[in-house]
Amino acid sequence: MNPSRPLFTHAFVGMGCANSLLLHALHRNGLLENSRLLVIDPEPKTTNDRTFCFWLSPEELHANGLESLVEHSWDQVICNDQAPQQLQHKRYYYLSSAALYAHAKAILTHYDFIWEQRAVDTNLGELATHVFDSRPPEWKIQHASQTFIKQSFYGWVLRTAKPIFDPHTFTMMDFSIAQNGHTQFMYVLPFTDDQALLEPTRFGKQIISEEEAFGLVQAYLAPFDTTFELISQEQGRIPMSSAAPISRQTATNVTLMGAAAGQLKPSTGYSFVRNLHDANALVLSMKQNASSLQRRQVKLRFVYYDRLLLQILARKPHRGKEIFQRLFAHNESQQVLNFLDERTSPAQEARLMLTLPIFLFLGAAIRDLFQHIITFLSKVSPALLLGLFAVFIEQVGLLEWCQPLLLIGLLVVGLPHGALDHLHQQPGKKWQQLLPYFTLYIALGLGVLCFWFVAAPFALLMFLVYSAWHFGQADLEIWKLKKSSIEPFLWGSFSLLFLLFTHFLEVNKVLLQMGVKLNWLSDAPFFSSMTASPFWMLIGIIPVFIFRSWRIVEAIIVLILLSSLPLIEAFGIYFIFQHSWNGWRYIAQITPMNHIQLWWQALPFTLASIGLFAGYYFWSSAQNWGLLFIFLSALSFPHVFFMHRAYPTKS
Ligand SMILES: Cc1cc2nc3c(=O)[nH]c(=O)nc-3n(C[C@H](O)[C@H](O)[C@H](O)COP(=O)(O)OP(=O)(O)OC[C@H]3O[C@@H](n4cnc5c(N)ncnc54)[C@H](O)[C@@H]3O)c2cc1C
């Protein structure tokens, strides 16, 4: 807290549409008594920077105390070349932003307030007890199903020499104007029979230029054979995004408002009524002293409809005209407005959808579903996908199909992930300069190999310890979960022991091949429980509780799936598609190379390790899985050693 700043009860960051309406609602409900108000806005908010139009029932307008601000209203609407339609219980209202801002300023004078004309971007929570942040947001496409386009327009209020307008009827969308490969329409607000706002508007990636817009106005007026004079001009670019605004880190006393709080309807760019309803919801929860502030309700199916429409407008802009023409031709305007207000029932929406080019929307829905599946799959660990696949093919008796996948995985990522240590340990060195490093690498491996011949049980213990350490490091580093230096070892031990104990009979056979007898272990207390996955699932509650991360839950699900597979398939999937995959991604992060370059860098060492193993295998007297694991332990020791040096000591 800045001690020199007086303590404000409410701070309004930005005094545009949303915060003006909130201030208005707070004031009308007597929620600002004895308040000290702070407004921060880089703009003086004295100019008419936009006009707000919206549809409401006269009763609702009255209930919200906005009548005095309205400058014009219409009770009939035209869309395209149709006959004018009555708006029935609603009217279409027009108020200038200048009037709204002036109204907000007039309200402020009832209170102790300060208006600071500046921009603020940090420490908003310190401004006041309650902070309402309406700074315009940024949008970022998070995945392929999302679309970001713009509604761009130029509007001219003009006076025509001839009386050509009907002042009772506004034109919401007239798609008779040239489309030129875009989705664009004329929006007309007639104030008198010879004065109107004409606004050529485009929905799309490309912004409409002033020249294009003015050309469209001239072409629109040409059939009336009238001259005209320009009175005023407005222009706008409103984001139409199916991605939510990028969330801002906010303190708990900061409430996002307006577009930043998702109050801009993506498919239309209208936000005035949404802001009004949101302000009312906030005020209601303040009056009720609710523990958390309530917001305008969002119905997810409308988010979905908007997403499909934006996808079509972005990908097939030339089809926009057809969609909107059919929407207005086959449905009453009142019904369309209710739909845009998100106040229709699913049955009404279905009827409305059937009037649209249905295959276009079906195609968009399939594409959307496909993109969601791809996005979902890209977030799921490959080990989970492979684990599910392997369990499925095992059930149908085709587990051998797993082997080619394991072989490919071993060549693509399993072996290469361990063949890149020189890149991060000896960066930029030429082959001949790497000789001492390779000598040390091979010596470390040979040392481990010798150890197996001299004291196999100790070599096994060592192998388990450094593998657990290394597996844990690879997982926790890439998942950004490491908080202390012991956690990787504990997590790695848990994973490894889960895998080994739930395959104990097979592990025991391999260990015998490696020269280690563990028969005594069978007499240990709880031994039979330890070979069953429920025991490890129970233990798994501890890491879930400690890390509180989906990644840990996912990894435990993988281990549960693997416990039902034979050892070699289970270990292969775990080693390649969890451990190696995570290790590979970490190396890709710390080296300035892409995946293909990394793979080529690893290739000589991948081939060398295959060659070494082949020689070792055929040279050995007994050829079995034990041999492979001894070789792995020797090969992995220097890798574990050097990777440990590559991981940061502190997270
Ligand atoms: C030209 C135009 C015409 C429109 N017409 C309509 C219409 O007819 N009907 C309708 O429903 N919607 C309309 N819209 C859309 C919608 O009304 C606006 O997007 C609406 O203003 C959004 O409200 P808001 O409060 O989130 O943002 P704004 O009204 O833009 O308010 C944001 C405020 O934050 C201030 N600010 C910016 N940066 C900072 C900072 N760093 N620190 C402090 N303050 C900051 C800005 O100066 C501004 O005053 C129109 C939009 C435009 C651009």
Image: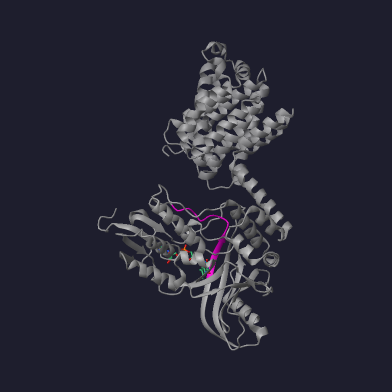
Instruction: Examine the structure image and report whether residue 244 is included in the region drawn in magenta.
Output: yes
Q: Nearer the viewer, residue 13 or 86?
A: 86
Q: Is residue 387 above or below residue 224?
A: above
Tell me where residue 103 appears, x and y as whole percent: 40, 70
Could you tell me if residue 446 is visible in this image?
A: no
Rendered location of residue 432, percent (x, y):
54, 40
Residue at x 48%, y 40% (from the top left corner): 480
Query: Which residue lies at the image location 54% right of the left edge and 10% below the top edge?
Result: 523
The residue under the point 60% across, 17% down is 508
**Camera sees residue 376:** yes
- 64 on left or right of 573: left
Q: Position of residue 404 (x, y in %)?
A: 71, 33
Give the side of residue 394 with respect to residue 526, left or right.
right
Is residue 607 positioned above or below 296 on the image? above
Q: Quadrant of residue 619?
A: top right
Residue 296 magenta-highlighted? no
Camera-side residue: 564 or 271? 271
Residue range of the region highlighted in magenta in the rendering: 236-248
Q: Residue at x 40, y 53 (%)?
A: 286
